[in-house]
Amino acid sequence: MSTATAGRERGTATRVVVAGYGPAAHRFIERLGELGFGGSITVLGEEPRPAYDRVALTSYLGGKTAEDLTYPVPEGVTVRLGDPVVAIDREARRVRTASGHAEPYDVLVLATGSRPFVPPVPGRDLPGCHVYRTIDDLDAIRERAGHVTSGVVVGGGLLGLEAADALRGLGLATHVVEVADRLMPRQVDEGGGAVLRRHIEALGLSVHTGVAVERIEAGPDGAVARVVLSGGQVIETGLVVFSAGVRPRDELAREAGLPVGERGGIVVDEGMRTADPAIYAIGECALAGGTVHGLVGPCLTMAEVAADRICGGIAAFTGADTSTKLKLLGVDVASFGDITGEGTLDVTYLDPVGGVYHRLFVSDDARTLLGGICVGDATAYQTLRPLVGRELPGSPTELLFGGTAGVAVDLPDDAQVCSCNNVTAGRIRAAIAGEGCTDIAAIKGCTRAGTACGSCVPMLKRLLEQSGVRQSKAMCEHFAYSRAELFDIVRVRGINSFSRLIAEYGTGRGCDICKPAVASILASLGNGHILDGEQAALQDTNDHFLANIQRNGTYSVVPRIPGGEITPEKLIVIGEVARDFGLYTKITGAQRIDLLGARVEQLPRIWKRLVDAGFESGHAYGKAVRTVKSCVGSTWCRYGVQDSVGMAIALELRYRGLRAPHKIKAAVSGCARECAEARGKDFGVIATERGWNLYVGGNGGFRPRHADLLASDLSDEELVRTIDRFLMYYIRTADRLQRTSDWLENLEGGLDRLREVIIEDSLGICAELDAQMERHVAGYVDEWRATLEDPEKLRRFVSFINAPDTPDPSISFEIERDQIKPVMIPLEAVR
């Protein structure tokens, strides 16, 4: 593959029309802009939305929105959506769309993609049969999944396993049917396929290989009811997803008289030009070098080559890196280079207990790497793939048994690091040295490396380190340690005061950054009430008064209502307190009742009334676990499959008062309909018929993020234990004010690493995390009640020390919608 652009001269095209708007088309128009193309660009798309990230398509069912996946349309590009090209008039150089619109062109680029292949089996058109290609397809699958309990995926390749993962995430009992004798027959060999199958079956999926679908039968309602396999086996199911490969969409070219391949695909040369010099083809509809490419990397490269040629360049597409690394159903699978094994030596490593299979293909002298397969553990992929065709950094045996972590690898500049975007190690080094990139985000923005599948990100970090780029971990000028390092220092050394910590490990007297952070660490490790002794002076304003300060200097009082469940008697008490103290009341989106407008000297009296009625602090003021929201679940809802209210109450009571680097919100939904919006929380729980699915790392707020699925079908005990460890590991290792979403995104190895640590116990710390949580649960004390019982703590709840009974005269209210609202002091009055 070559994308050399030397010799580019200014192109002559002024009107470029693109038929189709997928990722390849998007990259093409992006690249035209980067090359300074000065003519007009018109894109005619079939779908009703602009191009979106198809690599991340499954994440749409995991909570991402269509907007999350959609690429921004480059400035100056005209886009007509939902109006596909249906005919080409080559002589007049004009295309016609389905609506009858005619668009003239100087250059036409066909980027029509491919269509899913549906085997010609009886019943394939029944309601309940779907393909897995577009956002609309996924919407239809999700809707159907809400009415059935099991699904069958036809096809055990890359996309088939993606679809199986999606069905499993929707709570369906999932079957995979593959006509070959193993899963992913194009990417792995027999040994790798066997290991992959064991992994997937261990997750509860049923795998059927070496059989085909003979027919699909309907039930009384006319929709899919069962699938009959070639061996006679019958699978009862209400949903079938075909993912048995794709076929290039070349009908436009055929009808226009352009050559196509025997098995489909528009024939193009190295410059992506068809037999008509004014027409190019890129992406999955193109037949380049006799091959139709279905991976995103080659398709994007084709787009870049075509853009370069149209601008007068000489770039050429001479082949493609078909390396693949994916996380399928939680299992690492990677293949790279030549894995045919023809005329090569190979070395194989199999760990049947750990479920790891590695195979390297090398030259006759065992010095040159030719290819490899990794299943179960693909950490070596990032180091080995760029070395295909080059001398190995160690013997194959050392690499298989010793790993690559300790191998000194200095990639040559022309080694490809990001195959999705064709970015070399030399380009990365240039971005670091010449363009000032000092972190992954800057490298992504500068080079596009790491913006597609993301498998090259660890290598980008390594190149940063090799270039001498170091990130400071210091919390502030007073501590040269990160929050995680300070947490361990406090924990291991048994330090219980800020003054001792700064005396032994810091400098100066501290600041507004390190004091609250250390206060949070001390509280997390159970060092008594947060207003005890020296700790009181470390707290910020909210923690200092155990209430949130509002814009007019008053405070909010938020009693805990676990799971949102409350008795009429308690509701009456809240109403009476609000009435008697003249407070503004509001039911929040987190199933709590806010009482706003309390003056500082009123706080203890309000707490007293609430505590006497059985309420306790809801910790709305703290960087702590706030709420666990829930729907009514199986108790009341006809769709609920588990007791979401009971689980939410249990979780909220278990984690109440738990201090953390940032506030923590959670939710429990009683079924996949997700009425509690659990995937928008730091940890979210969604009921399945077999238990609970646990999602982590979500949040709303300024930068919303949907949570990632950490574990599936957990029992009650497994769920609580996994959340215990997740919270404690986060509290132990996150930076100051870092939400779980940012923490997870920055965690080396991401979600996989988190699973290794808190589920597989790779660091051997799970027992310690468990014990830490048990100490917290056993030692919980309500902060409001403890304050009421301590006269010394109560002394701080006054507006004026020398006149403790005098309210702040600057606080006043007016009435709006029958409740108080603060009257703000005009700025002119305080200047």
Image (cartoon, rainbow, N blue to C red):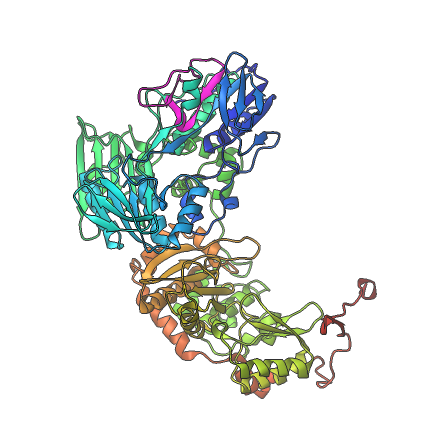
776 left or right, relative to 374: right
- Marker count (numbered): 0
Which residue is drawn at the image coordinates 39% and 30% (left, top)?
Answer: 114
List x then y, in percent, for residue 746.
Answer: 45, 51
List x then y, in percent, for residue 14.
Answer: 59, 18
**Which residue of the protein is positioned furthest toward the front in this rendering?**
220
Q: Which residues are magenta?
A: 258-287
Residue 6 seen: no
Which residue is drawn at the image coordinates 83% and 63% (left, top)?
Answer: 828
356 left or right, relative to 290: left
For the residue pair 817 and 28, the one nearer the viewer reads as 817
For the residue pair 505 and 9, the one nearer the viewer reads as 9
List x then y, in percent, for residue 548.
Answer: 61, 71
Q: Quadrant of the C terminus?
A: bottom right
Residue 489 seen: yes
For the residue pair 722 and 389, the one nearer the viewer reads as 722
86 left or right, relative to 401: right
Q: Main secondary structure of the magenta part?
A: loop
List x then y, in percent, for residue 624.
Answer: 50, 68
